[in-house]
Image: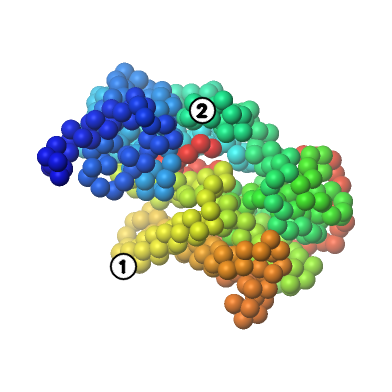
């Protein structure tokens, strides 16, 4: 309990926490580094730091708003999770009557904190899908309060609070004086999407462009695509497709788009983010050649047809490279009382890491997914078990297998990129092909399941000309999100 100089550890932790809370010699962006480590001293500092916050009598969303203004949550997935758990623990201590169970109260607070973070990302973040409704928010939390349900009144109040006013994120004071460093306050609604903002940013790199046929096979969460057409029969469209940064844009005409040119006024359909996505050959689709599939972060599934096998492999490689380079570490899953499996939140904002840091991060995620999959396979459910347990096992296994494949692909591509850092991606593709012993292809994705119906059901793409229509938004899972949307 003592340091080398004889001073008690708890006293040192309190002194440091006090300075961090008062920002005496520290910036908001530096606080998290002292609270997130997996050792006794860092945990002691985190507990002392949270003890300065008085959450008594506050609603959870109000307490969270205040906490997020005090420090910039940063670091790896597990590190951010440790900080949020300390917040949940402190809120429950200050409000012991809100959740009756002393042992499970912190877990319940943590689960709700996860839900609030996800809801904020969905309503005000960078997604291009339909926003979560109040009923969907309530349904997603069914059974997550130690096997029971949260009060509907509480959940409705949280929903409408976040819908009316998004969570604001802390920035250092000196950054607020510099517009290029301050966090943008995008307007509520889907037109505030950074995908559309990136279309105007001349500094975002272009990875590839060309003509592709496209159709949506699954909607968000692998659900059936809506519309009057039968399932799996949505029509194909031809687009001049541009992969810029971590976004696929669909443009009118067939003309080559110069590097750095604004895409405003050229887009004819909603862009598709490739962050945390995986492109693979559509091996189950046999009606047309050179078709690949793209599974996005929210588990939409798109099919694309390229003109040649070489072009298909090139699109697959470059989409996955963009995803590997720009995908930020996933937010941690909720812990404690949560029993139903839900996928972690995947941040939409681009990672601010070097290639080497991205490579290490993806390797860590690959190791974690491999270990979790091995643990899962060692603990098989009973064959006569409850249907819910069997379904939960199947979903976990499907998800972990997919994540393992995705991160294996990311690591492979970044290794090749680090070996061939030339700006010319054609040279990188050649290097990739040589290392793979031929034309590089990503591994086929998951075997089919109820959330991945057979691609045999699709009809073939048409040979229609590129669309010239003038025109032109996550999921219900819960987890502890720790970064701004």
Task: Give residue 411's mark.
Answer: none
Is there CB contact under 8 Å for labels 1 and 2? no
| Nearer mark to the viewer, of 1 and 2 | 2
User: Which residue is denoted by mark 1 in the rendering?
Assistant: 378
The quarter of the displayed image where residue 207 is located: bottom right
**Is residue 271 in sight in this rendering?**
yes
Would you say 235 lies left or right of 422 here? right
In the image, 472 versus 430, the foreground residue is 430
**Is residue 457 in sight in this rendering?**
no
Residue 405 location, x and y as percent? Answer: 51, 65
Residue at 26% x, 41% y is 43
Residue at 85% x, 44% y is 469
When the figure is inspected, residue 279 is found, relative to residue 333, above or below; the finding is below
In the image, 462 versus 457, the foreground residue is 462
User: Which residue is denoted by mark 2 in the rendering?
Assistant: 174
Residue 400 location, x and y as percent? Answer: 44, 61
In the image, 293 versus 42, the foreground residue is 42
**Disc 2 crowd, CA 10 A, few/some/many (<14, 14-19, 20+):** few
Nearer-N-terminus badge (1/2): 2
The quarter of the displayed image where residue 150 is located: top left
Would you say 34 lies left or right of 72 here? left
**Label 1 secondary element:** helix
Residue 286 location, x and y as percent? Answer: 70, 72
Residue at 58% x, 52% y is 326
């Amino acid at each position: 309990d003592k340091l080398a100089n004889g001073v008690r550890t708890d006293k040192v932790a309190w002194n440091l926490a006090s300075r961090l809370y008062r920002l005496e010699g520290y910036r908001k962006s530096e606080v998290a580094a002292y609270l997130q480590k997996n050792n006794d001293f860092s945990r002691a500092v985190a507990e002392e730091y949270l003890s300065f916050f008085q959450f008594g009598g506050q609603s959870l969303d109000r307490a969270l708003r205040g906490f997020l203004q005090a420090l910039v949550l940063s670091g790896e997935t597990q590190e951010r999770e440790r900080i949020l758990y300390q917040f949940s623990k402190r809120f429950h201590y200050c409000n012991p009557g809100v959740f009756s169970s002393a042992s499970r109260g912190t877990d319940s607070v943590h689960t709700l904190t996860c839900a609030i973070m996800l809801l904020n990302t969905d309503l005000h973040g960078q997604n291009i899908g339909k926003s979560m409704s109040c009923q969907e928010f309530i349904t997603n939390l069914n059974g997550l309060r130690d096997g029971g349900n949260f009060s509907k009144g509480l959940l409705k109040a949280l929903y409408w609070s976040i819908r009316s006013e998004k969570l604001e994120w802390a920035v250092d004071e000196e950054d607020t004086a510099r517009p290029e460093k301050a966090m943008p306050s995008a307007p509520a609604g889907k037109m505030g999407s950074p995908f559309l903002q990136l279309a105007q940013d001349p500094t975002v790199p272009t990875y590839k462009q060309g003509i592709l046929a496209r159709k949506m096979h699954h909607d968000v969460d692998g659900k059936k695509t809506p519309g009057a057409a039968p399932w799996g029969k949505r029509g194909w469209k031809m687009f001049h497709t541009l992969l810029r940064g971590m976004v696929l844009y669909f443009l009118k005409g067939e003309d080559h788009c110069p590097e750095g040119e604004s895409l405003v006024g050229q887009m004819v359909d909603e862009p598709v983010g490739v962050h945390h996505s995986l492109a693979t050959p559509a091996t189950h689709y046999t009606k047309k050649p050179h078709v690949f599939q793209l599974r996005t972060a929210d588990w939409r599934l798109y099919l694309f047809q390229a003109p040649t096998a070489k072009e298909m492999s090139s699109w697959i490689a470059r989409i996955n490279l963009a995803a590997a380079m720009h995908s930020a570490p996933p937010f941690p899953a909720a812990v404690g009382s949560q029993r139903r499996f839900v996928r972690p939140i995947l941040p939409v904002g681009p990672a601010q890491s070097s290639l080497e840091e991205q490579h290490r991060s993806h390797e860590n995620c690959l190791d974690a997914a491999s270990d979790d999959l091995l643990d899962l396979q060692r603990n098989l459910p009973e064959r006569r078990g409850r249907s819910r347990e069997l379904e939960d096992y199947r979903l976990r296994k499907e998800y972990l297998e997919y994540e393992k494949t995705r991160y294996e692909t990311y690591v492979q591509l970044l290794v090749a990129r680090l070996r061939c850092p030339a700006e010319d991606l054609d040279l990188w593709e050649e290097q990739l092909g040589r290392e793979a012993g031929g034309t590089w292809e990503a591994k086929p994705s998951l075997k089919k399941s109820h959330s991945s119906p057979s691609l045999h059901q699709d009809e073939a793409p048409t040979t229609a000309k590129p669309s010239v229509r003038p025109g032109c938004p996550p999921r219900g899972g819960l987890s502890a999100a720790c970064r701004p949307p």
